[in-house]
Image: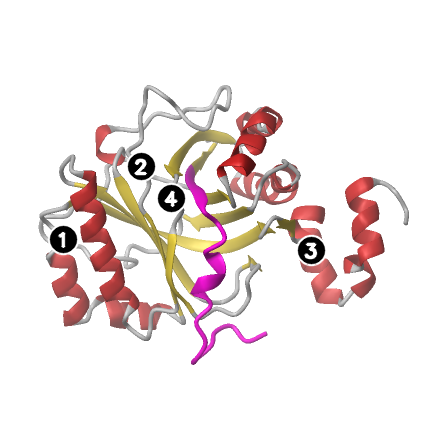
Amino acid sequence: MPKVSTTADYAARDASIAINSYTTVLRRPRVPHDIFATYWRDVHGPLCSRIPGLGWYVQNHLDREQDAHLWPAIDGIAAFADYELDGGVEIGFASKADQAVFNAASPILFADEQNMFAATVAYALPSGSRTLVDRVPDPVPNGDDGLDRIHVHLGARGSDAAAFGAAMTGFAETLAADPSVLKLRLHLPDRYDNAEPAPPAPNVDHAVPADRTLIAILDLAFETPLARRHVLESETFLAAYRAQTGQVAHASAFAVSGVYTYVRDGQMTTAGLRGSRAAQLIERLGANNQVADDVRGMIATGVVR
């Protein structure tokens, strides 16, 4: 499957996720990154994938080592202070009823977070997220697909959520119109309330400072870093970005090292069923028997059909 399409736009395939959440994650400081990433991908990931009601589950692993040229600095918009992340997670549902089923069963999942996460913050998107453009054919990426991907977190300057959301929507639409932008998914979550910490995971921090209670997140993909720099240094982009200073106070960008899809449209992927690395091995060796219905059924239920 080609990495990108020059003609097709697959944005509509995400519309089935009516309710969504975006969770920022920070690993425990004394857990080595490779252990953290392996556990998250191959232990926590398959556990989450089996929680009933789930319609959509994607881990975005973030790379702290990539340089600072991810997003332009302009006067009037500062980086968030003391903001480091190791990932961003989407957990979504087709309906409120499905979300309620998931929530009732989720304690078994959230009890696992303390093994690897120091902090997790679940921003609620009760009306879902919006994919403005997606020229990446693969609906279930599992790893580094070679594209240049970043997540940009933008913090509101004031308290008017409606005005901030409208500004971020217009800004995203301008950016998505550039043909070098291969993907743009916009998250406009509800204002986070520290009085109701989420997710309810024990022994994990869920509080945020005031400047990160009302945010927007841009999930962006470009063919290469050079393509990204070309777009973000263009006068069209810079003019649109400078126009946001009345609504945006802070911006921080994070490089994505890999995208791992465990559930889509209510169905577990091979990564969700077997773990991310096992799924990569199955694909690399062309092990068709491992993705056949009889094997999948046996792994999922323990019953040979």
Look at the image and tell me whether residue 93 can be seen.
yes
User: In screen coordinates, is 185 left or right of 283?
Assistant: left
Q: Earlier in the sequence, mark 4 or mark 2?
A: 4
Q: Residue at x 52, y 70 (%)?
A: 137
Between tags 1 and 4, which lies in front? Answer: 4
Q: Position of residue 291 (x, y in %)?
A: 77, 59
Compute the Cα span from label 3 to label 2: 35 Å
Callout 2 amino acid: Asp
Q: Magenta residues, as a range?
A: 1-24
Look at the image and tell me whether residue 220 can be seen.
no
In the rendered image, which residue does mark 4 sit on? 127
Q: Residues within 10 Å of mark 4 (few under 14, many from 20)?
A: some
Residue 130 or 85: which is nearer the viewer? 130
Query: What numbered label is drawn on residue 244?
Result: 1
Q: Position of residue 82 (x, y in %)?
A: 28, 35
In the rendered image, which residue does mark 2 sit on? 190
Q: Position of residue 145 (x, y in %)?
A: 52, 65
Answer whether labels 4 and 2 touch (C-beta < 8 Å).
Answer: no
In the rendered image, which residue does mark 3 sit on? 279
Q: Is residue 54 inside the magenta stretch? A: no
Between tags 1 and 3, which lies in front? Answer: 1
